Image (tube, grey):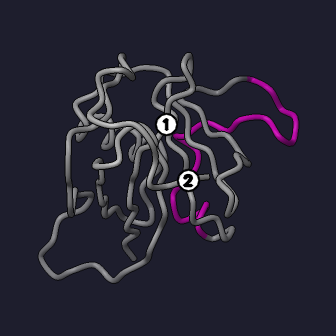
């Protein structure tokens, strides 16, 4: 099984990325793939599952926060995309700038792997990624993925 995620940005109406990734990829692996594909530097990032209104539910962080409470963030390295999807979560928020709370949003679709195709891969891309450090450097304002 391959999951296809369409990534959009509130900062740039033109930005779109379609990522096709194996179901058994960890969130850490997905984070590293996204970071490379967008040309971002390594930094503090998190994934969040989200409800249909894009409210954040569960957080997944780069490192173990050492908190054992039930709602504590979980390490990205410990969770696969298949585990998240298995729990009926098909929306992810990727927070690439935790200081300024900047993020992209992704909807998931499932598909069968194509013969001879290597995953993970960027299946579609349009427009430059939001600037990692300067939100004012983006092409347009507004959102096509209103929350």
Residue beneath disc 2:
146
User: Helix or strand or loop: what does disc 2 sit on?
Assistant: loop
* Residue sitting at x 49%, y 36%: 103
Q: With respect to residue 32, does 125 lie above or below?
A: below
Q: How dense is the environment of label 1, judged by Cα within 10 Å: few (below 14), some, or many (20 and up)?
A: many
Q: Give the range drawn in magenta.
A: 66-85
Mark nearer the viewer, 2 or 1: 2
* Residue sitting at x 38%, y 61%: 6
User: Helix or strand or loop: what does disc 1 sit on?
Assistant: strand
Work out how far the residue at label 2 is from the one at label 1, CA to CA, in angstroms: 13 Å
24 or 106: nearer the eye? Answer: 106
On the picture, is 51 further left or further right than 126? right
User: Is residue 111 highlighted in magenta?
Assistant: no
76 or 49: nearer the eye? Answer: 49
Q: How dense is the environment of label 2, judged by Cα within 10 Å: few (below 14), some, or many (20 and up)?
A: few
* Residue sitting at x 64%, y 64%: 89
Name the residue at the right extreme. 69
Where residue 63 appears, as percent x and y from the top left, is: 58, 26
Quadrant of the drawing holding the N terminus: bottom left
User: Is residue 75 highlighted in magenta?
Assistant: yes
Where residue 105 appears, as percent x and y from the top left, is: 49, 50
Q: With respect to residue 140, does 14 lie above or below?
A: below
Residue beneath disc 1:
103
Where residue 40 appears, as percent x and y from the top left, is: 29, 27
């Amino acid at each position: 099984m391959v999951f296809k995620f369409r990534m959009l940005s509130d900062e740039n109406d033109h930005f779109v990325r379609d990522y096709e990734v194996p179901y058994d990829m960890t969130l850490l692996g997905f984070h590293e793939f996204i970071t490379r594909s967008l040309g971002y530097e390594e930094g503090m990032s998190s994934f969040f599952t989200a409800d249909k209104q894009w409210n954040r539910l569960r957080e997944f962080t780069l490192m173990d926060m050492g908190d054992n409470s039930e709602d504590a963030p979980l390490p990205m390295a410990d969770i696969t995309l298949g585990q998240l999807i298995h729990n009926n979560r098909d929306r992810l928020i990727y927070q690439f700038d935790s200081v300024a709370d900047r993020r992209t949003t992704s909807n998931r679709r499932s598909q069968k792997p194509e013969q001879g195709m290597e995953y993970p891969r960027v299946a579609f891309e349009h427009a430059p990624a939001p600037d990692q450090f300067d939100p004012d450097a983006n092409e347009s304002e507004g959102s096509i993925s209103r929350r």
